[in-house]
Amino acid sequence: MINAIITVIGSTGTIGSELTDLLSNSRTSVRAVLRNISRVRELAGVVWMQADVSDNRLLESVLAGTDRLFLLTGNRAGFGKTQIEIIKIAERLGVKHVVKLSALGASPRTKSGLALEHWEAEQTLENSKMSWTILRPHVFMQNWLGEESKTAREEGVIYSAIGDGKVPFIDARDIAAVAAEALLHPEKHSGKRYVLTGGEAVGFQSLAEALSKATGKTIVYKPLSMDEMRLRMEKQGMPKTSIDSLLALAAYQKAGGATERVSEDVQQVLGRAPRTVLDFANDYRERFM
């Protein structure tokens, strides 16, 4: 058992819940921070703490006694300022190592407000006295558990505007596993920036085939034009800003190039290959049936 307190900010999301499980299984002392107390689970070694980390008045109590910190917050505009404040207080309170969940494309030159805020928080962390590990994941496979699972169940169809574009989607469980490794063995991962992708770039046709194989029912991929996808999202009541952002991302993925690049960082950190689309389909088959 590691004689350290690991605080997990963002402990109940797609990545954080898996990370909290992994840390619990490693017999580590975990402080899991959450806002919705109804999401508390019985886990060995885990103490749950209800707090809104955007409230600076609560941060000292959240971070007091913390040795290692996992930092993941919501991505609403302004989240970067929240993360910067957390990093500054963590440094002042003597936190030794921070693992920050960032974003692919975080840079001072990005046109994405989200990626820019991540980059600004990264800079604060890198310029602190703490050791750090930064994780920059590609698109999560678990995103398919929303719209794609709904249309697969109801229509046997998956829709996308990326055409034949391919993306090295990554299973969020692999992101959590890399985060756990960096938290449990910070000496091996200090000062590292990991780009986290799946083992190969795949398109939605491959997803439809994997889901068909896993579920035993025919699921097909129907590519839509940008205009068709916009109309579809408008009918669903999505805000215009969200539609514009998603379509801009789809256009980038459709064009290929940088968005297709595969990183070997998951393999190098975990000593195994990332989960495949078929692995995902088999593990989540019931959500598509």
Image (spheres, helix red, strand yellow):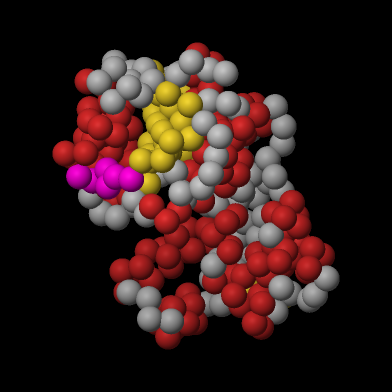
Judge left or right: residue 243 versus residue 155: left
Identify the image quadrant of the C terminus: bottom right
Judge left or right: residue 173 versus residue 131: right
Say which residue appears at 45% left-offset and 53% top-offset: 39
Q: Position of residue 98 (x, y in %)?
A: 39, 26
Please, what is the dominant secondary structure of the magenta stretch?
A: loop
> Is residue 265 something one can see in this rendering?
no
Residue 273: quadrant of the picture = top right
Identify the image quadrant of the N terminus: top right
Judge left or right: residue 201 versus residue 185: right
Magenta run includes residue 250: no
In the image, 224 versus 149, the foreground residue is 149
Say which residue appears at 54% left-offset and 59% top-offset: 143
Stretch in magenta: 50-55
Looking at the picture, does residue 269 appear above or below residue 102? above
Say which residue appears at 61% left-offset and 40% top-offset: 174
In the image, 268 versus 82, the foreground residue is 82
Say which residue appears at 23% left-offset and 50% top-offset: 78
Residue 25: quadrant of the picture = top right
Q: Position of residue 188 (x, y in %)?
A: 54, 16
Looking at the picture, does residue 24 appear above or below residue 65? below
Furthest residue in direction left, as rendered = 57
> Is residue 67 something one can see in this rendering?
yes
Magenta run includes residue 52: yes
Q: Position of residue 277 (x, y in %)?
A: 70, 54
